[in-house]
Structure formats: structure tokens, C-alpha cells
Image (tube, rainbow, N blue to C red):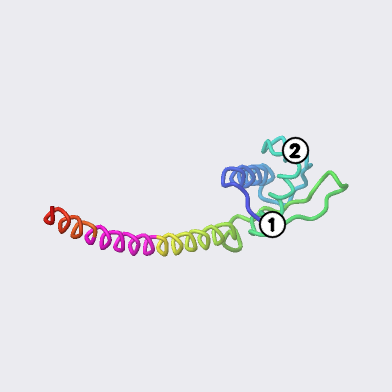
Amino acid sequence: MKLKEKTYKKFVDFFAETAARNQNTPFEVAYAEIQRGTGAASITMKKALQVLVSDGIIETKPGRNSRYVQVTYQQTPLEPKPADEDANAQKTDALAELLRTTDQLRQRLRVLEILSANLQERLAVLEEAK
């Protein structure tokens, strides 16, 4: 799962601030409060919670009812952000594709240079024959 960097940062900042207000102890927060604090829609909030849990930023447990969640904020992520790894893999793949394309274009350019040279020679021969 991926989140835009700006959205990811909003959620991390929200939970860091909320944890600081609660002296870094586990706290219960309403989903509506998370949405107000981050400005995110409910689907984005649910996805963000899943991403933050998988990244080790927070741990969650069910709250007192379906509108609340108990959160434990971790000071640092437990593992690198998978989105970073995915982005690096995508960049590596894109770079490899770019290198292949560049090599193909160089080969085509060389062929066109040879053809151009041949045409220039033939044109010179025809001009001499006149």
C-alpha cells in the first residue's frame, strides 16, 4: 500500500502530536477526530492507519466501540517504509528501461548515419555523371 508523502506526513504528525499530549502513553482516539486532524476522508484514514501499522509507526487495538481506536505511538519506525523500497525498485526498473531505450536509439542513430553517408556518396556520383 502506498500513500502520498504529504498524506503520510500528515498522519505521522497527527499521531506524534496526539502522543505528546498524552505523554507518549497509549491513547484512545475517535476516527472522526483523526479525520478532523488530518483533513482526510474515511477511506484514506483507514488506509493510512494500515500503512502506519505496517511501517511500525503506531500499534492499534479496537477501542471502546466501533468509532474509536486505541493507539500506541512508536517513537521510530520498526522497519523501513515499504513505500520507499517500492519507489526505489520502480526507479531502478525505470532506469534500466531508460538505459535499454538509450542503447536502442544509439544503434538506430548509427544505422541512419551509415545510410546518410551512403546516400551522400551516391548523390556525389550522380552529380559527377552529369
* Residue 60 picture quarter: bottom right
**Amino acid marked by disc 1:** Val
Query: What residue does disc 2 label?
Result: 33
Q: Residue at x 67, y 54 (%)?
A: 51
**Amino acid marked by disc 2:** Glu
Residue that sits furthest to the front in the current view: 130
114 relative to 128 in the view: left or right = right
Question: Where is residue 116 shown, x and y percent of the image?
Answer: 25, 57
Q: Please tell me which of labels 2 and 1 falls first in the chain.
A: 2
Query: What residue does disc 1 label?
Result: 53
Residue that sits furthest to the right in the current view: 65
Q: Residue at x 78, y 51 (%)?
A: 70
Taking depth in this image into account, of 119 and 95 the one nearest to the observer is: 119
Question: Is 62 located above or below residue 107 in the figure?
Answer: above
Boundaries of the magenta span = 102-118
Give the quadrant of the N terminus. Answer: bottom right
| Mark 2 neighbour density, 10 Å: few (under 14) some (14–19) many (20 or more) | few
